[in-house]
Image (cartoon, helix red, strand yellow):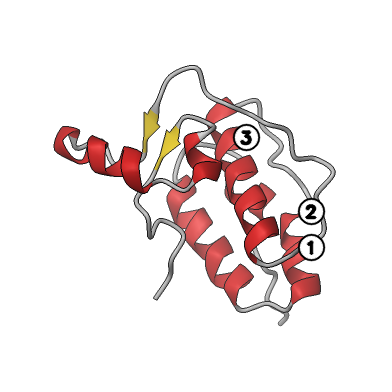
């Protein structure tokens, strides 16, 4: 039986349970060679959910730079009208504002510095 890797588009197709699917995508992405990394980022999520489009755009843009991948033709600068803190604890919000990578901040998404890290 062949294992099918999770693409970014599949991981972020809907808000419900997206973090679990995103973690699977990250595991698959980090264990892949450059060509497979580009393939996993190739398609945007098939959704009208602006949060999912914006976070996918942020992740794809960050990974393109970090791993020197070919520019994806679907990337557009999605940005949210209101700030989205992936950790909703009020006292952590200033820390998230400071720590969020620019690719997230410019889309009004605030995450911890290690948000895309996996063990």
Where, by quadrant of the figure, is residue 29 drawn? bottom right
Furthest toward the left, the residue is: 91
Whole-percent x and y of residue 32? 68, 77
Q: Position of residue 12 (x, y in %)?
A: 58, 44
Q: Secondary structure at mark 1?
A: helix
Residue at the spot of label 2: 42
C-alpha separation, residue under disc 2 versus residue under disc 3: 14 Å
Ranked by sequence position, the earlier of labels 3 and 1 is 1
Q: Which residue is mark 3?
A: 53
**Mark 1 touching mark 2, by CB under 8 A?**
yes
Tell which of 88 and 79 is nearer to you: 79
Q: Which residue matches tag 1?
A: 39
Give the residue drawn at x 54%, y 32%.
Answer: 107
Q: Is residue 78 above or below residue 95?
A: above
Q: Is residue 89 left or right of residue 119?
A: left
Question: Is disc 2 surrounded by few (<14), some (14 to 19) or many (20+) residues within 10 Å?
Answer: some
Q: Nearer the viewer, residue 19 or 95?
A: 95
Q: Quadrant of residue 30?
A: bottom right
């Amino acid at each position: 039986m062949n294992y099918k890797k999770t693409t970014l588009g599949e991981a972020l197709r809907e808000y419900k349970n997206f973090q679990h699917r995103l973690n699977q995508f990250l595991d698959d992405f980090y264990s892949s060679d450059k060509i497979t990394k580009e393939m996993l980022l190739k398609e945007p999520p098939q959704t009208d959910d602006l949060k999912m489009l914006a976070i996918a755009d942020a992740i794809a843009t960050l990974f393109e730079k970090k791993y020197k991948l070919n520019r994806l033709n679907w990337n557009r600068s999605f940005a949210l009208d209101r700030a989205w803190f992936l950790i909703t604890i009020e006292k952590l919000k200033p820390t998230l504002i400071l720590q969020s990578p620019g690719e997230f901040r410019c889309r009004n998404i605030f995450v911890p510095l290690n948000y895309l890290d996996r063990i």
